[in-house]
Amino acid sequence: MAQFDENKLGEQEPQIQLSDNAYRELKEDETYKPVLLETKKYPEINAWTVLWGILMAFIFSAATAYSGLRFGQVFEAAIPIAIIAVGASTLARRKHPLSENVIIQSIGASSGVIVAGAIFTLPAIYIIKETNPAVGAEIQVNFFQIFLASLFGGFLGILFLIPFRKYFVSDMHGKYPFPEATAATEILVSGAKGGNQARLLLISGLIGGLYDFCMTTFQFWAENISSRMCTFGEKLAMDYKFVFKVNTSSILLGTGFLIGLKYATIICAGSFLAWWVIVPLLGQYGMTLDGIAMNAFDPDYIFANYVRYIGIGGIAMAGIIGVIKSAGVIKNSLGMAFKAGKSTQHDNAQLIRTQKNISAKIILFGFLGVALLIAGFFLFGGLQMSLVQVLIGLLIIFVFAFLFTTVAATAIATVGTNPVSGMTMMILILSSFILSAVGLKGGSGIVTALIVGGIVCSALAMAGGFITDLKIGYWIGSSPYKQQAFKFLGTLVSALTVGAVIMILSKTYGYTGKDALVAPQAHAMAAIVESLMFGGQIPWLLYIIGAVLAITLDRIGIPALAFSLGMFMPLQLNIPLLIGGFIAWLIGRRKDEALNRQRKEKGTLIASGLMAGGAIMGVVSAILKYAGVEITFSSWTGSDGFNLLAIIMFAALSCYLFAHAVSVKKSKL
């Protein structure tokens, strides 16, 4: 067993630089060495990190919740928080910024995942209350329902993920690209290092930020390029249901570079099957259950209301397959956690700090405590549930949260996108069916189903987001048990904030009328639950088709989850991933492996900067829109020049990424 001496300060500090095997699979005789010494104690938890972490959780929870409800766009907070943490530590001249900034990022990043888990489901209660007066009279909603659903779900996500930490961040080292974690790690390391790398990150961040800001806020060019820009393309769309679309965001281009060509191709293969095969076939030959021919429907409508459900079925089955395949991993992970929990305090002190999780005893008591609190919430929170219904509700929450935890973590590790809304749709359908079968119907049944869905959605969002934080900590050399312990604090702050924001915005704007909140995911959830509680159609056939497809893909060796994600996500969000992945492949085709590695490292830094700049300016754009600042050129927007400029600017951004990555010459190695 490795020894850990907290006073071992004489050991020479390594350079602040990621090992050259940080992003690739390890050879048999290789081990990964993090940036920080494993045997030395670093400042991680102190007043600086906790206060900054809380501040970041509060600010980004409010900003993300507003952006998601008002405009339908939820941005990830990990990268912007990493940049702010680096900036603050630089201005304050902190002596150990790297170890501290990981904790700030981890606490603050609770905001994005808690917000996603909450706003995808819980506003549906308000939507049904507004749009269905007969049922709305029975529905009572308050701050504590929203706050506690988010809080309990976040806590469950943390607890379920901890036993899988070693598997995802260590055992699978180099097998998953972890795009968001890679970008955040590059930011933290480059910020601590300074010099040329920090300068390059800053420049690429400014380029990505200005690019996205000009596109989204000023609307100098189109955000989405579509074949429907021209008359011939519109004819193809309406007559043959064929559409080509690509989002021109710098964030997606950078994400594609970090994902790589392999996974980007698999994702796009699923998207191409959905958009270029199934949608046109349904458009030509499909009929609705009411006997209406689909040839009159728009291809986007066919995708959103039919084909996307095939992707949801595939995601759900891929999750089940993953759980079955991971049975051994689950058993070993839980076994190791229990073993660690049974060891004495002295034995735990001897573990290298980078290997220590929160003890199994705390995890078990945490599960028990959360279960009791949820039960009390169901019984005394105004939901009018019997004891049997409470037990069934608890069973639904724990079973689904457990089953899909690894799905959420795998999705984030693979493509940086968590299909939490798709999984939640499936869970809402099943839970609504089960709860209605045991007598929960009407207004109380709707509220209960959505709160159950909200808890599970928050748990899955947290599981997916937290694996990013733990991977960052693994690469840098943080203490995972400290990240895990203070993640609960970030979750508490974020749940309080998002609960208040949802209440305020729902009362200020509402969900009907001219200036209503968009909340697209919540509207979809409301439609599902309302139809199930009062009788409606469930697209079981589409789910089954997706499930069968996932099984077939798994049998022939194609990652079913990545493929199904492509079928679920809009086409325009997938194609830029393929472009970024192709650039990454293109710069690594030289026979000189050392040169390829140097070019890939530089490209990774540039792609991280593009993602970071775009994310930061996304926050700024949301704030400006909140303040009522709208700077657009109505005569220019939608014109041929507006669309053509989008193609030119996206091509220029792609060329910038490629040209600067290949600018590394052999003579400089």
Image (cartoon, helix red, strand yellow):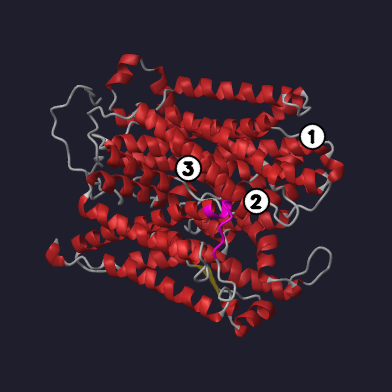
| Res. 265 visible in picture | no
Q: What SS does tag 1 mark? A: helix
Q: Percent from the top left, x then y, of residue 214? A: 46, 65
Magenta stretch: give its range: 624-631
Residue located 22% across and 24% down the image: 3
Above or below, comparing residue 619 to residue 211 in the picture:
above
Q: Quadrant of the C terminus?
A: bottom left
Asked whether disc 3 touches disc 1, contact meaning CB atoms under 8 Å apart, the reply is no
Q: Name the residue that disc number 3 marks.
A: 465
| Res. 280 visible in picture | yes
Q: What SS does tag 3 mark? A: helix
Q: Main secondary structure of the magenta part?
A: loop
Q: Name the residue that disc number 2 marks.
A: 521
Q: Name the residue that disc number 1 marks.
A: 444
| Mark 3 vs mark 1, CA separation in Å | 31 Å
Tell me: 150 left or right of 200: right
Q: Quadrant of the N terminus?
A: top left
